[in-house]
Image (tube, coloured by chain):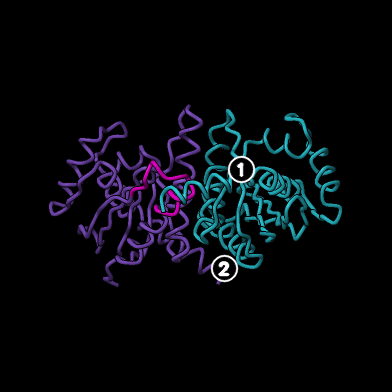
Chain colours: A cyan, B purple
Amino acid sequence: MNETTRIIGIDPGLRRTGWGVIDVLGNSVRFVASGLVTSDAKDDLAARLCQLHDGLDTVVHAYAPHEAAIEQTFVNKDAGATLKLGQARGIALLVPARRGLVIAEYAPNAVKKAVVGAGHAEKIQIRMMVKVLMPKATFDSDDAADALAIALTHAHHRGSATARIARAMAASG
Amino acid sequence: MNETTRIIGIDPGLRRTGWGVIDVLGNSVRFVASGLVTSDAKDDLAARLCQLHDGLDTVVHAYAPHEAAIEQTFVNKDAGATLKLGQARGIALLVPARRGLVIAEYAPNAVKKAVVGAGHAEKIQIRMMVKVLMPKATFDSDDAADALAIALTHAHHRGSATARIARAMAASG
């Protein structure tokens, strides 16, 4: 019953994809690691997507999380930026899915609400609350902090999600 | 000097990704195969991206093309559709890139101009011209026909592209 669940949170981006790994045991959360996978803006798009894929796959392989969580992309008015983000996000979804992980998606407001308690929080508040919730957490970028916040959001929500999946499996099995 | 170059053209989409493989020898082109990789709209996004990845990777592995060509995505005003297409396009670029293929990108108008001779051609004209250029070509969807048209476009343009790459390699080597 008291098994640790390891969660990876991913904040996708073509130039910088943040990631954060936490362990969850009951109501307690523990920081494991965080970092950034980058692509070289001088390379062509396909090469950059390969860099994101290989970097993220190395992280998922090394830390062997059980579940993944990713931010639902904010669709803005700049179609070119949306397309770029979409391409990076496709890779960020593919990597954990190919390793058999269930992937949860959370809207940016849900992440802010779960971590800070308000849907309109600033980046600095997210960084601070990640440190309050996990004092040992280290991160050297907003993207890594966001990724940890996404993982924390999933830790808060996964009880009900796990129950839903168990019910669905029982119903189909 | 007279080596056959095999080209795969890809027309990316989340629901349907068309592909077409042709052989090029000098100025002649030969149809090899075409088809469709689909994802199940009932599945979640990550699973669908896996389906596209595995389907396309099977095709690339089976036909072992030397070069790939993909349509430059038309960025429309529907941000949600752009994001979806972006995610599928990320996979369509990743698969050949991970297998070491050079990937060329062509704007839709360039494809129409190369195949039909006019930048404003209709789908039906593209299908007809693919048949004229390669009488033995078979395709059972517009997406597969478009993918063959993209491959043909690359066949038309690659002479100069290959020369550019050779120059770049000579300069860096």
- Quarter of the image where one finds residue B143: top left
Number of numbered discs on residues: 2
Residue at 62%, 52% (x, y): give it.
Answer: A41
Q: Magenta segment, which residues? A: B38-51
Image position, residue B150 (x, y; %): 32, 48
Inspect the magenta stretch and tell me whether residue A38 lies in it.
no
Compared with B170, A75 (above or below) is above
Between B103 and A118, the one lying in front of the other is A118
Q: Is residue A56 left or right of residue B88?
A: right
Image position, residue B96 (x, y; %): 42, 60
Image position, residue B67 (x, y; %): 37, 61
Hey, what amino acid is under mark 2? Ser
Q: Which residue is mark 1?
A: A160
Q: Which residue is mark 2?
A: B172
Same chain for the residues under marks 1 and 2 in the image: no
Q: Which of label 1 and label 2 is nearer to you?
A: 1
Residue at 66%, 55% (x, y): give it.
Answer: A7
The answer for which chain carries disc 1 is: A
Q: Is residue A168 left or right of residue A20?
A: left
Which quadrant is home to the N terminus of chain B?
bottom left
The answer for which chain carries disc 2 is: B
Residue at 43%, 47% (x, y): give it.
Answer: A171
